Amino acid sequence: MRYRLALLISIIFIVPFGYVVRFSPGFSLPWLQDLLGSVAYEIFWILLVGFLYPKAAASKVAIAIFIATCGVEFLQLWQPPFLQAARSTLVGRLVLGNTFAWSDFIAYFVGSFAGWLWLRGLIHFNRKFS
C-alpha cells in the first residue's frame, strides 16, 4: 500500500512538471523543453504501469514503456484521418505526438532510465520501511 501511495504521489508530481517544462514560455530553448517534456512523459508512463502492476519488475516495466513509446514515435509517420483527428486534440497530441523526430529516441532512453531508477528507488524505499 505504501508503495502504491508513493507511486501516486510521484505521478501527481511528474504530470504538472512535464506539462510546465513542455509548454512554459519561460524556457527559451525549445529543444530543452522538448527533451525534458519527453523525459517526463516516459517517467509518467513507467510510474503509471508500476502503479497498475505493482509486482512487475522495474526493468521489465522500463523496457516495455521504452519499446511502446518508440512504437508511438514511429506511428507519427503514419497519417491516416482517424489518427490526425485524435492528434488534433490536446490529449491526442500529448499521448500520440504529432511530429516524428529521431532525437526523441534519446529522450525516451534517458526517460526510461530515469523512470527505472525512480521505480527502483521507490521499491527499495518500500522494502526498507515495510
Image (cartoon, rainbow, N blue to C red):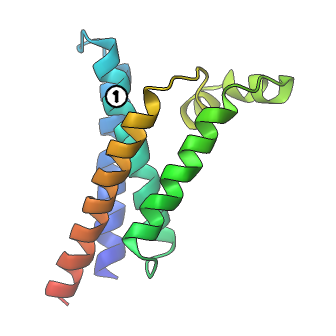
Nearest the eye: 9 or 94: 94
- Image x and y of residue 103, in percent: 43, 26
> Taking 6 as reference, is 25 above or below it?
above
Q: Residue at x 31, y 53 (%)?
A: 113
Q: Residue at x 36, y 63 (%)?
A: 8
- Specify whether 130 is left or right of 41: left
Dot 1 amino acid type: Leu
Disc 1 marks which residue? 35
Kindly give the residue lying farthest to the bottom in the view shown: 130
Kindly give the residue lying farthest to the top in the view shown: 28
Nearest the eye: 13 or 28: 28
Asked whether the viewer can see residue 129, the reply is no
Total labels: the figure holds 1
Crowdedness near tag 1: few (<14), some (14–19) or many (≥20) residues, C-alpha within 10 Å: many
> Where, by quadrant of the figure, is residue 2 drawn?
bottom left
Kindly give the residue lying farthest to the left in the view shown: 128
- Specify whether 96 is left or right of 57: right
Q: Quadrant of the N terminus?
A: bottom left
Q: Quadrant of the C terminus?
A: bottom left
Q: Residue at x 55, y 51 (%)?
A: 67
- Specify whether 78 is left or right of 100: right
Nearest the eye: 103 or 18: 103
Q: Residue at x 65, y 25 (%)?
A: 89
- Image x and y of residue 4, in percent: 36, 74
> Taking 50 as reference, is 83 above or below it?
above
- Image x and y of residue 39, in percent: 35, 39
- Image x and y of residue 108, in percent: 42, 41
Asked whether the viewer can see residue 34, the reply is yes
Label 1 sits on a secondary structure element that is: helix
> Taking 122 as reference, is 2 above or below it?
below
